[in-house]
């Protein structure tokens, strides 16, 4: 059954006339994502029929439940979409309904003592950050930018500027409320127990975080709708309000007060010829910092991050690139005196000793790299995230590879992935991309004091179908090489149809995802086509996979 | 058609949604975090810049047609004050001409004969008939100046260093004539050699450009430019941010030149008075004991930057050839009014959360007040609520449109706040 006037009337009854529309002009704004090569290709291939059948704005969990139940009754697909800064929240088939959560925008609770906040889907990171800051607290800052939904990003397992202490999204989810694809509500963590509070993800109550695996071979918004989360807040050593100077794109924040210090560290190797040594030394630095348990931010930034995040205009970015303002990659570290200035000074002494031990050098304040990064971008890294700017070089970009593993394995993976990208370039694939950003470096983001790590490398095609096809070819080649190396690929680009390609190399994970999808979404209507391929497992395939069990 | 000029900008939106939020660094609370009046009122993304980019792309690709969707298209396009908050937010991360997209949608609506809206046409007709937007006789234009002994530069042989251009609303709106009267008194006391155009003053035409009626705008602008040339104007001072932006930015853009290449300089009164204070030509004698907050008019702030003309094309990677210096809200007039307020003894200024380049619009601009009064009122009420949160008793501004709409917002919300013009405060402190 498709989306009909009956379906529309049923939804109208739930949310009221003013919170639903099927007007083509209003729905056009939800037709595409147009971000990353995936979005560009979708735009080229799909066109008009990818406009949703309607957009509906629920105001509560109960309304979400009712909408999902109607969707199951009439069997039409639905997708929740917050900021839209993602590549899987657009219709892939006709008759799709978009749920826009703008009416669900409350901070329900901000608990200073137990350091958590309970929020609804349309609360942006910048909002919860601002509120938490009043209490000397903050949230991890998503690289997607602090304009995105905090709830969606945590459920997706986003990565953060201060992941050195906070880890990724999952580590910050203390509980959630989820409307399953069939309309049933489940709650996880202590949120599942009435009056238990919302402070702990392991319980009392079930820990269902594994269900929200987002980009980690997850369901990409295809397993219902998260309507509420409890997220962890962290102690913030900066001021209650960000000090800024200037206006608009020339607004900077060069200081976070006496209890926060930034450092750039480099290693004396020739770049890019001796990139391997530089990366290995960076890993050593992070391991030593982790052992000492110091630091608020610790990350390795390659040129593409340094240039894009610190640029004030596209021309400025290209000028800085051509003028070699960042002649190499750098480690960027922030120390925070959360308890006292003495703590900060102690950590600084330890950092200096570590840097000396691993053969690093602190970048001087008068060096162009320091002046541009620390003045323009360092504090943005904490408050903004600002991955929007990754699109600045060519008005588009793509993650070329990404992994999660130990820091030293990540170094190996960056080098291996970059080699695949360079080999592709030698064949002429990606020759029109922004060079040299597309072929060197990598972002190393050690998590939780270096307990584990993730990385990305990026490529910068324009929003041109031919270039985007080449980017997808590179991503595919890198992905295959990762599996051949038995690497723990993060696989955020391998969702949807790509599951079928990579699943067999990874223990048939695609089939298990499909099996889960079949079990919880029997009508295959919760963002079909991105959680898995649009086709569902046959009864025979399902029985075989489940060892004859299941139902 | 107009949309073709901004096809690249509209179609390269990456849907990051930065356009929907206030400056991400400056967000200070959950309550006052959003920046787009059009989206807050309309709720659906179509009302945001991101949505308008999608709609523009849809129109260019034939996925949407004007003919089938005229009414809702006009609502999406015109229920927006064109305050540029989206444009400034976007340009922090990308190099897309978002305000250009909004302008082009209006221009194309007019080119196709669907725009401007009936309420806007009344304004245009009034300007054509009476040289002002308020359907008032020309002879009353300078009534505010009676018995003030101000030079009329439109008369043969009259000359002055400065043309004080009053604007339609200050000239005609009941109760607002104190602003030009106080301005003239201040200029006199400071020893400035100035004059007015009296009954010959013609509307700047900014409203015509704002609603996309470029032909009418050009006619009005040419009339004014001819007058300025005839009397040899070197410096124009105006109280109205709309006129300020029009003379400075729009007249330059129309002539395809930089603002700096115009034969005259344009200053908003706050800029001019700031200089007079610095030069010790204005002295404050009396404290004005008021607890106030300052509302940045959009046309003075983020839309008040000098225009830098560019003709070229997008080349590889979306770079522009020749390099284009876009207006990004950096050099708007933000500090002059604040410096004046700080200089007035007794004034306690406390800022709202959304200020300067990321200020919340009053909701009146772009023809929104006349065509969608409910929207304009809701937007003003939001600003009043923000002003009340500061604890101040009065919201001070320097724009007749903001003042009128904020006053309506106060009346509608039952607030006890008052609205005032900065010039009245300056005069009070001088007397």
Image (cartoon, coloured by chain):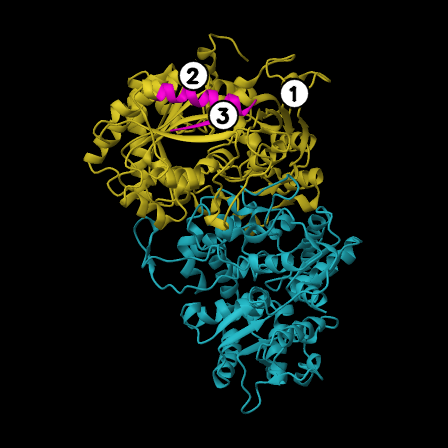
The residue beneath circle 3 is A157
Q: Which residues are magenta?
A: A332-355
Both labels 3 and 1 in a single chain: yes
Q: Position of residue B427 (x, y in %)?
A: 69, 68
Q: Position of residue B315 (x, y in %)?
A: 31, 54
Among the 4 quarters of the image, the one containing residue A425: top left
Marks 3 and 1, the one that precedes in the sequence: 1
Mark 3: which secondary structure?
loop
> Does A182 appear in magenta?
no
Mark 2: which secondary structure?
helix
Is residue B381 or residue A399 the one in the foreground?
Answer: B381
- The chain ID associated with circle 2 is A
Q: CA distance from mark 2 to mark 1?
A: 25 Å
Q: Which chain did the renderer colour yellow?
A: A
Q: Measuring 30% from the left and 30% from the top, which residue is drawn there?
A: A441
Q: CA distance from mark 2 to mark 3?
A: 22 Å
Horizontally, is A295 left or right of B274 in the view?
left
Marks 2 and 1, the one that precedes in the sequence: 1
- The chain ID associated with circle 3 is A
Are circles 3 and 1 on residues that touch, CB within 8 Å? no
Q: CA distance from mark 3 to mark 1?
A: 22 Å
Q: Measuring 58% from the left and 71% from the top, which residue is drawn there?
A: B238
> Does A354 appear in magenta?
yes
Instruction: Give residue A114's mark.
Output: 1
Q: Measuring 56% from the left and 57% from the top, which residue is drawn there?
A: B335
The residue beneath circle 2 is A290
């Amino acid at each position: 059954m498709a989306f009909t006037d009956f379906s529309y009337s049923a939804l109208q009854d739930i949310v009221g006339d003013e919170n639903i529309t099927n007007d083509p002009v209003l729905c056009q704004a939800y037709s595409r994502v147009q971000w990353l090569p995936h979005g560009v290709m979708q735009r080229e291939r799909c066109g008009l029929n990818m406009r949703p059948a309607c957009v509906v704005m629920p105001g509560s969990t109960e309304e979400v439940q009712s909408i999902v139940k109607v969707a199951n009754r009439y069997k039409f697909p639905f997708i929740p979409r917050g900021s839209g800064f993602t590549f899987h929240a657009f219709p892939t088939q006709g008759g799709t309904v978009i749920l826009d959560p703008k009416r669900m925008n409350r901070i329900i609770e901000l608990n200073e003592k137990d350091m958590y906040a309970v929020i609804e889907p349309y609360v942006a990171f910048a909002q919860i950050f601002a509120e938490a800051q009043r209490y000397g607290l903050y949230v991890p800052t998503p690289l997607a930018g602090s304009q995105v939904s905090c709830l969606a990003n945590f459920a997706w397992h986003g990565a953060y500027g201060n992941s050195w202490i906070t880890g990724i999204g999952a580590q910050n989810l203390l509980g959630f409320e989820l409307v399953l694809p069939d309309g049933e509500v489940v709650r996880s963590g202590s949120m599942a127990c009435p009056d238990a509070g919302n402070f702990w993800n392991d319980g009392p109550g079930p820990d269902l975080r594994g269900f929200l695996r987002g980009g980690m071979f997850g369901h990409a918004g295809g397993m219902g709708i998260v309507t509420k989360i409890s997220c962890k807040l962290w102690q913030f050593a900066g001021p209650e309000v960000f000090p800024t100077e200037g206006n608009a794109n020339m607004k900077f924040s060069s200081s976070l007060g006496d209890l926060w210090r930034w450092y750039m560290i480099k290693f004396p190797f020739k770049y890019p010829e001796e990139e391997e040594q530089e990366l290995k030394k960076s890993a050593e630095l992070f391991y030593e910092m982790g052992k000492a348990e110091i630091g608020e931010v610790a990350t390795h930034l390659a040129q593409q991050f340094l240039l894009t995040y610190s640029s004030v205009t596209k021309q400025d970015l290209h000028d800085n690139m051509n003028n070699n303002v960042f002649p190499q990659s750098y480690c960027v570290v922030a120390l925070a005196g959360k308890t006292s200035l003495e703590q900060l000074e102690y950590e600084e002494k330890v950092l200096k000793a570590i840097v000396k031990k691993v053969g690093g050098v602190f970048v001087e304040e008068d060096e162009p790299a320091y002046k541009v990064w620390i003045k323009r971008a360092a504090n943005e890294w904490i408050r903004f995230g600002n991955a929007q700017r990754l699109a600045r070089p060519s008005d588009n970009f793509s993650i070329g590879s990404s992994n999660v593993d130990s820091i030293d394995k990540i170094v190996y993976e960056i080098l291996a992935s970059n080699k695949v990208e360079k080999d592709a370039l030698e064949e002429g694939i990606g020759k029109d991309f922004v060079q040299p950003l597309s072929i060197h470096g990598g972002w190393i983001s050690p998590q939780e004091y270096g307990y584990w790590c993730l990385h990305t490398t990026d490529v910068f095609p324009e929003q041109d179908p031919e270039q985007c096809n080449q980017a997808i070819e590179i991503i595919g080649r890198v992905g295959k090489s990762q599996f051949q190396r038995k690497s723990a690929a993060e696989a955020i680009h391998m969702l949807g149809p790509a599951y079928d390609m990579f699943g067999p190399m990874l223990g048939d994970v695609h089939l298990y995802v499909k099996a889960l999808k079949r079990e919880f979404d029997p009508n295959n209507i919760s963002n079909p086509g991105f959680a898995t391929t649009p086709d569902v497992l046959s009864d025979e395939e399902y029985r075989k996979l489940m060892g004859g069990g299941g139902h | 058609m107009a949309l073709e000029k901004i096809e690249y900008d509209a179609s390269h939106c990456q849907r990051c949604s930065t356009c929907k939020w206030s400056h991400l660094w400056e967000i200070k609370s959950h309550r006052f975090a959003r920046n787009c009046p059009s989206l807050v009122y309309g709720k659906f993304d179509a009302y945001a810049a991101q949505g308008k980019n999608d709609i523009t792309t849809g129109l260019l690709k034939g996925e949407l047609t004007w003919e089938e969707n005229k009414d809702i298209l006009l609502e999406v396009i015109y229920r927006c004050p064109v305050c540029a908050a989206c444009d400034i937010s976007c340009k922090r991360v990308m190099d897309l001409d978002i305000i250009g997209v909004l302008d082009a949608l209006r221009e194309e609506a007019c080119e196709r004969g669907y725009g401007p809206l009936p309420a806007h046409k009344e304004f245009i007709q009034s300007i054509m008939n009476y040289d002002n937007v308020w359907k008032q006789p020309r002879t009353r234009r300078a009534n505010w100046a009676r018995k003030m002994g101000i030079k009329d530069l439109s008369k043969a042989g009259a000359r002055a260093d400065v043309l004080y251009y009053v604007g339609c609303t200050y000239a005609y709106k009941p109760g607002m004539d104190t602003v030009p009267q106080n301005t003239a008194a201040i200029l006199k006391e400071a020893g400035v050699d100035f004059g007015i155009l009296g009954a010959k003053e013609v509307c700047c035409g900014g409203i015509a450009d704002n609603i996309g009626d470029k032909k009418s705008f050009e006619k009005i602008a040419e009339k004014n430019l001819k007058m300025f040339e005839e009397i040899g104007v070197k410096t124009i001072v105006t109280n109205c941010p709309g006129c300020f932006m029009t003379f400075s930015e729009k007249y330059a853009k129309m002539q395809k030149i930089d603002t700096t290449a115009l034969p005259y300089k344009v200053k908003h009164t706050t800029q001019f008075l700031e200089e007079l204070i610095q030069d010790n030509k204005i002295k404050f004698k009396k404290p004005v004991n008021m607890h106030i907050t300052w509302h940045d008019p959009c046309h003075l702030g983020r839309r008040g930057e000098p225009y830098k003309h560019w003709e070229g094309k997008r080349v590889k990677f979306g770079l522009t050839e020749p390099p284009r210096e876009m207006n990004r809200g950096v050099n708007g007039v933000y500090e002059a009014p604040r410096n004046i307020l700080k200089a007035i003894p007794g004034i306690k200024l406390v800022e709202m959360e959304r200020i300067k380049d990321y200020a919340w619009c009053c909701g009146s601009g772009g023809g929104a007040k006349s065509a969608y009064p409910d929207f304009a009122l809701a937007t003003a009420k939001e600003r009043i609520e923000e002003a009340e949160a500061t604890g101040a008793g009065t919201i001070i501004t320097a724009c007749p449109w903001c003042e009128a709409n904020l006053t309506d917002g106060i009346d509608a919300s039952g607030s006890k706040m008052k609205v005032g013009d900065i010039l009245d405060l300056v005069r009070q402190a001088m007397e």
